[in-house]
Amino acid sequence: MRRGLGLVIAIALAAVHLPAGARPAAAADSLNLFGWSEYIPQVVIDEFTEESGIEVNYEMYASNEEMLAKLFSGATKYDLIQPSEYVVEALVKEGKLEKLDKAKLPNMKNIAPDYFGLPHDPQLDYSVPYMSGTVGVVINTAKITDPVTGYADVFQEKYKGRIVVLDDALEIVTWALHVLGLPPNDVNKESLEKVKPILQKWLPLVKVYDSDSPKTALLNGDVDLGVVWSGEAALLYNEDKKFKYVLPKEGAHRFIDNLSIPKGAPNSDAALKFIDYILKPEVSVKISAEFPYTNPNAAARKLLTPAERDNPASYPPGNPKLDTFRDIGANAVLVDKLITDLKAQSGT
Amino acid sequence: MRQESTSFATAAPSHQRAPGGIGWLLLAPLLVWVIAFVIAPAGIMLVYSFLKRGTLGGVVWEFTLENYTGVADPTYLTIVIRSMVFAAITTVLCLAAGYPVAYMIGRASEERRNLLLMLVMVPFWTSFLIRTYAWVTILKNQGLLNSMLLGAGLIGEPLELLYTRGAVIVGLVYTFLPFMILPIYSSVEKLDGALIEAALDLGAGPLRAFSRVIIPLTSPGIAAGVLLVFVPALGIYAVNDILGGGRVDMIGNIIENQFKGNARNWPFGAALGTAMLIAFGFSYWLVNRRQKMIEGTR
Amino acid sequence: MTRVNRLLTLWTAFILLFFYLPIAILVLFSFNESRLNVVWTGFTTKWYAALWRDSLLVRAMKNSLIVASFTTIVSVVLGTAGGWLLYRFRYRAASLLETLVFLPMIVPEVILGVSLLILFVVIGFQLGYTTIVISHVTFCFPFVMASVQARLAGLDPSLEEAALDLGATPLQAFTKVLIPYLMPAIVSGALMSFTLSLDELIVTYFTASAGTRTLPLEIFGRVKKGLDPSLNAISTVFIGATVLAVLATEALRRRSK
């Protein structure tokens, strides 16, 4: 028993001296980057380190909320985070973001003009668009021959059990709002009451809810159409041209993932250097090559390959009706409850 | 048949002594661990369950009972019951399927035994995600199972196996079976060979030998296996999310949503978690005390 | 008697087949041409070559093995000690202690992760290997303890008494009689701990740091991009190596007999 105890103590001592990984104390030459999993290609990070001499500690998360949880726990002081647009709005409201020193971001001029003037950060004072995309309808044209132009066309009885949708309560609610002609960001008790009957009709038709990899069910042929991220649709299109992507005529969500500097970042200089580096067109194309989302960098778009540019999911043609999400505050709780209830009711 | 052989602990309490100084000293590391890493975090969650939701997640330090009134909603009750039903079905299936395997391994020769144990565990040293997606490949409409059944002419059209409750059960049993096999194995291993042979020789037939002699003797292992399968199975969220197509929400998913989804409602998640904790903790404590009292009064 | 044995062997073989079926798919798809790893499109070994260059993935695997090994060691020590002490001594708060020990098994992982994170921040513990191991041990050692307790139930006390009568010290009785007796339970518990730790995702997310990413974190992070077959490849390499090691040990043991 005493031997066991000694062993425990020895291990504990050894473990404490093990390299603990990231050194959160900001050395002048390190950057604590907190981003979406795999969203920033390793080659881009490595080249940044080569050019600037700044070490990058890259931690990853899989949802905005996870990011917020770890950010505000204070366990590690991050220099750079990648919030979605509605999270940027909430963070700005709470005063949690540093104002960007535009003088240090000469490459901001590369950002396409339609990314300015958006409600979450009109002047781009607190955030720089990293990648954008849409949520729309993907159709397996080998199985679906009737025209599908929007949400109402998707959620028809004849497609029962053949539909995949994102497992995102807020998204689902906004689709119903669109169909009713209501503003998608007008989420409150009353509007939720109005969408409830529509969702009660829709949800029993759904076969799969999947925010992580809806392409799986589509590729497998277990479902034939769905409402998914444009990136997923783009990957599907690259795999097989039979997968068509359509932006719903009732209106669609344009999401923007941004780079922001949290208040109290130990090394905001390094963060600004990184942002400016990302804004270089030749670097930005590298990101597009890995992730077929919509690149907000106008200069980078000119450098895309024809295949990338012609992917209709990445760069939807025409002038579709797009909206970004707003921060809906405590109404998010009501949204979550509604979808949980309806999912449980639609039975399995 | 002596009564003792069917109870949880068959030894007379004479194996137990008063702890004395040395007993408490030796227990100290465990106590410290439990206080630091079980009570403290549980305490944090308990406290959070009475606070208000923060806009960016986290909490606002204002007292409220609204989280607990929220817990009392019928939707959540349905989901809790569903979790318990799935966990129970999983446990029963694991017991039925796993006991023979555990028995086989426990009675095997020493070299064979280790090999078999490794064979049982090694599949679970692969990534859970990839393993579960492999099940998707097996169960999907154009998947392995359907292809085989169609090819053998047993069915005319592919069966809808994936994204159903059945698929979730298969996934759950797959995940938890080793955790039923291992505890039972170690109980079987200590069985006296002569005793088993005697039971089987005395003409009652293997079924009666099993039910009257062998299974009761391995009941501690069975109890451990049931605990180590049922309890964690209550909290699962990933298996049912993938294999159930996100349609089979369990209590684990609901709680996860509060922290990782748009709801950003930590206090509510904490309240749900605390409710689960109290329900389990109390039941376990009661059963445990009763067992100890049975032991002590003999 | 042999009919029973034959049935048991058949059933065990069936269950093992059940266990290995997804693994066979996993291994097969590690040679799949398509990056999206969903439908079979052709044979290639390029993902194994990609593994060579994927230092992130290999480092994640290394981290997972380090964490799982330490977790198993600490869990075995705590679990065995706890199981034996609760057997030997009649503590007044025994039921309470046991309930508390098993509590982490019921607490949802996300809650455990968040609360441990808060705890570590409050006491100023830097995130890294130690915090991950601590969080893993917290829900792994109950498995060891349950296993050891089950094995101790029904232990003939005269076994230890005999050892003591024959002149052994209490410590010798413990190490030379009790520990060997407990071995199958300890091995069971160790296998369970190792397995649980190796595949742990959520709690690890909250208690890990940038340099201590484990394999599940790395793999889960790649879901959106697509779980490309290099992930299958690393799993295949790992279990291939393990199986080989086990067979080699078996062969050596048989040779030395």
Image: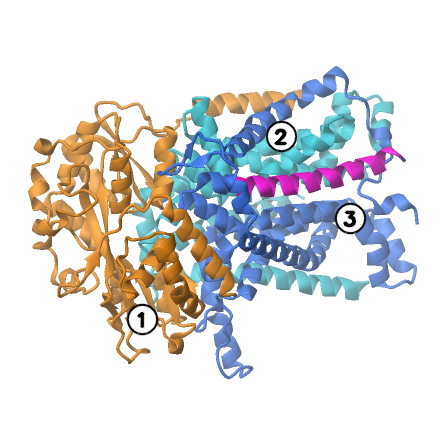
Q: Which residue is mark 1?
A: A152
Numbered mark located on residue B218 in the image = 3
Chain assignment, label 3:
B
Q: Which chain comes out cyan in the rendered image?
A: C
- Residue at coordinates 41% horizontally, 50% vertically from top-left? A334
* Chain coloured orange in the rendered structure: A
Residue A184: image quadrant is: bottom left
Disc 1 crowd rating (10 Å Cα; few below 14, some 14-19, many 20+) is some
SS label for mark 3: loop
Res A308 → quadrant: bottom left
What kind of secondary structure does the magenta stretch mostly adopt? helix
Q: What residue type is disc 2 on?
A: Val
**Marks 1,2: beta carbons within 8 A:** no
Start-end of magenta stretch? B271-297
- Could you classify mark 2 by the number of other residues whose Cα lies within 10 Å: few (under 14), some (14-19), or many (20 or more)? many
The residue carrying mark 2 is C77
**What tint does the image give chain B?**
blue
Whole-percent x, y for residue B23 in the image: 73, 20
Q: Find numbered disc 1 in the image and state the secondary structure of the residue it sits on.
A: helix
* Label 2: element kind: helix
* Residue A254 vertical position relative to residue A120 in the rendered view, above or below: below
Callout 3 amino acid = Thr
Residue sitting at 29 percent across and 67 percent down? Answer: A138
| Residue A278 in the image, given as x and y percentages of width and height | 16, 42
The quarter holding residue A35 reads: top left
